[in-house]
Image (cartoon, rainbow, N blue to C red):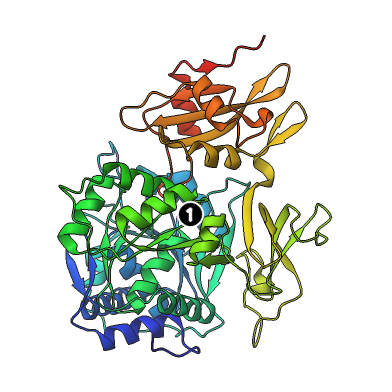
Amino acid sequence: MSGADNETLAEALEEAARRWPERPALIDRHRRLTHAELADAVARLAAGYARLGLAGGARVVSCVSNRCEALIALGAAWRYGAVHVGAEDRSTGPELAAIVEQTGADLLLYEPVPGSADPLAPMQTVRRVHPDLHVVIVGDVPVHEEWTRWSELVDSGAEPFAKARPGMRDPAIVFVSSGTTGRPKATVGFHGNLARRWRRLGGWLEFSPDDVHLAQLPLSHGFGMMMAVAALLSGGRLVLHERFSAEAALAAVGDEGITVVNGAPAHFKLLLNRLDQARHDVGTLRLSVGTAAPFAPELVTDIWERLGVRFMFMYGSSEGVGVATTDEDDIMRGSVGRPAPGSTAIVGPDHRPLPVGTVGEVAFSRGVYPVRYWEDHDALRPPEPEPVANGDWYYSGDLGRLDEEGRLYIVGRLKHQIDRGGLKVDPMEVENALLTRPEVADAAVLGLLNPVLGEEVCACVAPSPGEAPTLAGLRDALGERLAPHKLPEVLYLLDEIPRTRIGKVDSDRLRDLMDARRPQRLVRR
């Protein structure tokens, strides 16, 4: 893998265009672009920013689905010297207004939601709060005279122009979290750090110009963006899907010759449930990367055997911390990999290190991982010149342990424990146990209020095709794996477990589905 360790993301993308100009780069349902055409579109959008008078270092919020424009916008921000801010493409007006406020954004790229009664209503909400914000509309809808169409900006004819070429230690990206742990966090990623890490990731996974990557995870999130950019830096091709569909993904593997597919456990379960060797040709696949939640050994075995791929598990967060492994033994043990010595610790409530093998909170050294938030204006640059393995720590909120050989295991979340009569139950542990059962296609576990116990363990299950799990049957099957107080006491059978585009359970939609179903309940005698 070529490329220096002292380059920015802008320079890395430009180098890819020079090396592989005629190779395909992006494919969506609207068009196809080569690497050279992608670089040209990036330059023209950056020139449009100059025409708008955008300042160097400006924050550009991109609320665009997985289509070519999303990657053009990413590259244009970097080329111009602006900071890219990803936003979920179905974000509401108030959510976008909050992101603009939090990051001090100067421009918003917005793709109206298809089929909306008033597709531009969210923008009207944003402009009422931020009247001076530049708004650029992606797509063919009538726009307010004060707003700008994407096509007008890109085709303005202005000369390509970089307002302020970024340096290695300058911010490149702001990742805004979903806010599931409180107020959304605006995490900063830096040019040099990300360019170096993402190039090395592509080298580790042996990405090449011949690889075709299915990009179905949202580009507004850290994992989806990381995998997409790593692919482009290697001269690869992205097949962009705006929403995940197992049938569409399997069809794309055959039609486009997909070689790399990524996702959460739910994505792979759905792919394997839909896979029909008589209809689907998956022979081009060589690699899969899993993330977002632990993968049961049984699921990994199915991925290896039925998809015929090398498998990597990647654990991390938008803060840029994480661990990954392709070691089959580590993966089958349930480990997420072996962190570099000094980079990771397991700590107690007082943040003091715990003995090897003890479960506690997973902490990452800020010296190794330059975790910074946009609000910390006095700390918007990573350590100089090289990270060190001590100093402040980032506390992940995840529960885990390290074994004597340095393997890291993730066992749950600190704040998501079910309190059943004073005994703690981690939903992740119960979910993982349920997902080992052949009659269970997908599962989510939560605590329900109980007047005697405080909370009881509730399992929501999407059955495998042709199966009809029962509460009694699941409790019997899991009895050798889980302690009695961890066994489900309430069971909802659902058509699906609603999940976000990155594979996490959508708690609000889940409870709506539960309200419409009658559960099976444990009869206590």
What residue lies at 56% left-to-right and 26% top-to-bottom? 475
Residue 71: quadrant of the picture: bottom left
Residue 383: quadrant of the picture: bottom right
Q: Can you say which quadrant of the picture contains the C terminus?
A: top right
Few, some or many C-alpha atoms within 10 Å of disc 1 (few <14, some 14-19, many ≥20)? some
Q: Position of residue 166 (x, y in %)?
A: 48, 83
Q: Is residue 56 left or right of residue 155?
A: right
Q: Position of residue 409 (x, y in %)?
A: 62, 56
Q: Is residue 293 above or below residue 517?
A: below
| Front residue of this view, candidates 228 and 204 | 204
Q: Is residue 222 visible?
A: yes
Q: Position of residue 406 (x, y in %)?
A: 67, 67
Q: Is residue 110 visible?
A: no
Q: Residue type at mark 1?
A: His
Outermost residue toward the front?
480
What residue lies at 39% left-to-right and 83% top-to-bottom? 12
What residue lies at 68% left-to-right and 28% top-to-bottom? 485
| Residue to which mark 1 is pinned | 130
Q: Can you say which quadrant of the picture contains the N terminus?
A: bottom left
Q: Is residue 367 above or below residue 328?
A: below
Q: Is residue 246 above or below residue 456?
A: below
| Front residue of this view, candidates 217 and 442 | 442
- Label 1: element kind: loop
What residue lies at 50% left-to-right and 23% top-to-bottom? 473
